[in-house]
């Protein structure tokens, strides 16, 4: 749970309080958890099972993404006191969720989650990579798929010959890009990213990425790729050639 943007800013005591306030809920295949347009008073964290998210833009439901264990949803209605922005129903035979009420959310989670969401939304709104995505809701929900991770100087973030489970995005700090143990260039600008080679092309990584100093990265998990960046896959493929072509 602590990896999610809403909970990552909480300390251990606050996490303990939130976990203690959660209530287990069990749902079954095709059962709706939330419906677009309804009032929302709780959010959910997925413990087991898979759930599909749909949004009606006026011409029927459009599939947006699948939620997996560890992910959360329903926070938009609590953050902004607005109706549910999408519908979510159970995809698997059964799903076990943990439900958090509005009172506990407002008392402990809201301030930290609003600050984190605003940080991610500001980045996504200005990230050149996403300029092709026109629907503001798509960018808004993408913030749910962003997570933080820190690395120490000298840490190997991604090893050549492996397949990445994340697309990493520079928040601060410098990352060396190595081939055959030789540095060929570095990534240091906000928004520069890596790990895309194996996720976008389904091939092993050609390069090793090492933290040159203590760094902060954002990342999008591989399981969220299809519901976030896949719609700009042609741009990602082109960027791979631009970034790495002369070194491949």
Image: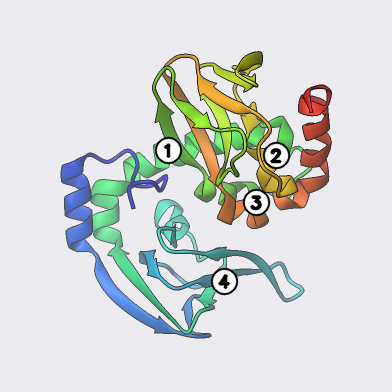
Is residue 172 visible in the rendered structure shown here? no
Please name the residue shown 49% across and 14% down the image.
212
Q: What is the quadrant of the C terminus in the image?
A: top right
Q: Left or right: where does residue 244 sit relative to residue 149?
A: right
Dot 3 falls on a residue whose secondary structure is: loop
Label of residue 197 in the image = 2
Q: How much space separates mark 4 and mark 1, taking CA atoms? A: 25 Å
Q: Which comes before the other along the chain, label 4 or label 2?
A: 4
Give the Cα separation between the discs numbered 3 and 1: 18 Å
Q: Residues within 10 Å of mark 3 (few under 14, many from 20)?
A: many
User: What is the quadrant of residue 159 in the picture?
Assistant: top right
Q: Nearer the viewer, mark 1 or mark 2?
A: 2
Q: Secondary structure at mark 1?
A: helix
Helix, strand or loop at mark 2? helix
- The residue depicted at 65 percent of the width and 51 percent of the height is 228
Q: Is residue 10 above or below residue 217?
A: below
Find residue 52 and name its label. 4
Counting from the top left corner in percent of width and height, residue 148 is at 44, 36
- What residue is disc 1 on? 116
**Pointer 3: what residue?**
228
Q: Earlier along the polypeptide chain: callout 1 or callout 2?
A: 1
- Marks 4 and 3, the one that precedes in the sequence: 4
- For the point 62% across and 70% down, the residue is 54
* Foreground disc of the pair 3, 2: 2
Lower position in the chain sequence, tag 3 or tag 2 = 2
Q: Quote the CA–CA distance across marks 4 and 3.
A: 14 Å
Q: Residues within 10 Å of mark 4 (few under 14, many from 20)?
A: some
Closer to viewer: mark 4 or mark 2: 2
Q: Residues within 10 Å of mark 2 (few under 14, many from 20)?
A: many
């Amino acid at each position: 749970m602590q990896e999610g943007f809403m909970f990552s800013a909480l300390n251990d005591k606050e996490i303990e309080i939130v976990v203690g306030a959660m209530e287990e809920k069990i749902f079954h295949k095709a059962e709706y958890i939330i419906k677009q347009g309804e009032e929302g008073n709780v959010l959910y964290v997925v413990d087991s099972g898979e759930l599909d998210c749909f949004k009606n833009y006026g011409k029927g439901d459009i599939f947006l993404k699948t939620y997996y264990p560890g992910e959360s949803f329903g926070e938009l209605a609590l953050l902004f006191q607005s109706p549910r922005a999408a519908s979510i129903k159970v995809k698997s035979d059964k799903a076990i969720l943990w439900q958090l009420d509005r009172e506990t959310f407002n008392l402990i989670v809201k301030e930290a989650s609003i600050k984190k969401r605003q940080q991610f939304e500001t980045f996504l709104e200005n990230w050149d990579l996403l300029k092709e995505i026109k629907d503001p809701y798509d960018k808004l929900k993408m913030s749910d798929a962003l997570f933080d991770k820190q690395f120490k100087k000298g840490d190997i973030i991604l090893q050549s010959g492996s397949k990445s489970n994340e697309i990493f995005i520079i928040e601060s700090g410098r990352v060396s890009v190595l081939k055959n143990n030789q540095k060929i260039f570095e990534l240091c600008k906000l928004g520069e990213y890596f790990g895309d080679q194996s996720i976008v092309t389904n091939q092993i990584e050609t390069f090793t990425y090492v933290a040159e100093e203590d760094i902060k990265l954002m990342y999008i998990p591989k399981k969220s790729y299809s519901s976030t960046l896949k719609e700009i896959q042609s741009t990602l493929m082109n960027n791979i050639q631009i970034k790495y072509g002369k070194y491949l």
